[in-house]
Image: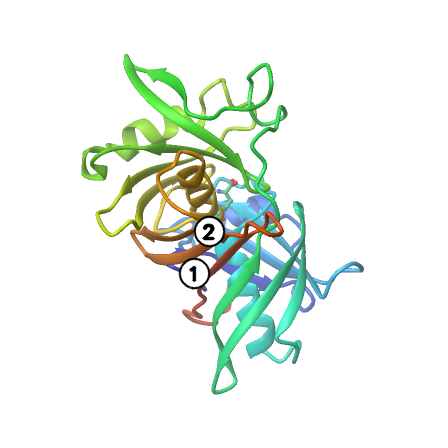
């Protein structure tokens, strides 16, 4: 399945348990010798929510949260009749998320995820005295990057630039992902504010490299844009693989992300 082009392999572990998800994600994510994807997502049961999610990047590292995958899980469980509810809860390593399923002709087309509160300080994920970084400057290979750190359960460094076409993402992405400021590494988003006010974002994901879209990254982008006075509380985030609508709700402080979820194919593979 894919959400705005961010494609993962989804396994319903209620039927097919995966003993070694780290090795399996590495093997199956490979585009030439495996299936080819941004990683592996395990759909499971939960004692605290309707379902649970575990997400493994293409390098086998496990992440706390995945925005695009949470929407695809909403589609999977409804379309495959594992639930008839149109509001479901999903247990993740970064807490329980609430999903509102938008259906058409009995199938889920879009999902709105309550991504909970953004964190601007997280001393576990960022090495600054106060664990916070709003528009601080990082120097890499003599070039300065002014970034804002936003944690959406997982870490994001958001950098605003004038022209996104000038970013050499394959070169700078891994250097920022692995910068000593981020002991757990970080996802990296470069953002250009377009004339219509929408946010054009490209992402280098921790553990997967360039992806077509990043749900938590789109949320971090919208939060950072508001904090840096570059957007209001509602943003359209335009990525290589598609757009997501993000609303940082003033009333409850939660971030709401709305976007598509698409099934690409069902398949079988030997473990
Ligand atoms: N690479 C991310 C996990 C996937 C997040 C992304 N694909 C999304 O849609 O939120 C990390 O290691 O934190």
The residue identified by callout 2 is 215
The quarter of the displayed image where residue 16 is located: bottom right
Can residue 94 be seen from the camera position used here?
yes
In the displayed structure, would residue 142 be above or below residue 102? above
Tell me where residue 52 appears, x and y as whole percent.
68, 58
The quarter of the displayed image where residue 226 is located: top left
Can residue 270 be seen from the camera position used here?
no
Which quarter of the figure is the C terminus placed in? Answer: bottom right
**Label 1: how many residues lie within 10 Å, few (<14), some (14-19) or many (20+)?**
many
The residue identified by callout 1 is 3
Are the residues flagged by discs 2 and 1 in contact, CB closer than 8 Å? Answer: yes
Would you say the beta carbon of the disc 2 residue lies within 8 angstroms of ligand 1?
A: yes
- Is 133 on the left or on the right of 158, as rendered? right
Would you say the beta carbon of the disc 1 residue lies within 8 angstroms of ligand 1?
A: yes
* Residue at 49 percent of width and 39 percent of height: 59
Nearest-to-viewer mark from 2 and 1: 2
* Residue at 53 percent of width and 50 percent of height: 66
Residue sticking out furthest to the front: 251
Tell me where residue 159 appears, x and y as whole percent.
36, 32
Please state which of residues 50 and 44 is positioned toward the viewer in this rendering: 50
In the displayed structure, would residue 162 be above or below residue 193? above
Tell me where residue 250 appears, x and y as whole percent.
55, 49
- Is 125 on the left or on the right of 142, as rendered? right
Which quarter of the figure is the N terminus placed in? Answer: bottom left
Estimate the spatial distance between the alpha carbons at disc 2 and disc 1, rounded to whole Å.
8 Å
The quarter of the displayed image where residue 176 is located: top left
């Amino acid at each position: 399945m894919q959400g705005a082009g961010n494609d993962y392999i989804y396994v319903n572990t209620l039927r097919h348990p995966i003993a070694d998800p780290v090795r399996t994600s590495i093997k199956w994510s490979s585009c030439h010798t495996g299936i080819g994807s941004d990683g592996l997502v395990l759909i499971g049961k939960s004692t605290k929510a309707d379902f649970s999610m575990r997400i493994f990047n293409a390098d086998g590292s496990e992440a706390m949260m995945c925005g695009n995958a949470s929407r695809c899980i909403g589609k999977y469980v409804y379309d495959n009749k594992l639930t008839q509810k149109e509001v479901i809860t999903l247990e993740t390593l970064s807490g329980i998320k609430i999903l509102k399923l938008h259906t058409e002709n009995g199938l889920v087309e879009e999902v709105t995820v309550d991504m909970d509160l953004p964190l601007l300080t997280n001393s576990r994920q960022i090495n600054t005295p106060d664990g916070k970084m709003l528009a601080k400057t990082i120097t890499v290979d003599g070039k300065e990057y002014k970034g804002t750190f936003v944690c959406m359960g997982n870490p994001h460094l958001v950098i605003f630039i004038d022209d996104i076409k000038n970013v050499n993402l394959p070169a700078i992405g891994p250097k920022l992902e692995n910068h000593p400021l981020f002991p757990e590494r970080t996802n990296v988003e470069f953002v250009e504010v377009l004339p219509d006010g929408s946010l054009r974002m490209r992402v280098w994901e921790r553990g997967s490299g360039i992806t077509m879209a990043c749900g938590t990254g789109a949320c971090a982008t919208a939060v950072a844009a508001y904090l840096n006075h570059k957007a209001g509380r509602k943003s359209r985030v335009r990525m290589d693989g598609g757009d997501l609508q993000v609303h940082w709700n003033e009333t409850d402080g939660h971030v709401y992300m709305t976007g598509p979820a698409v099934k690409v194919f069902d398949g079988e593979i030997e473990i």
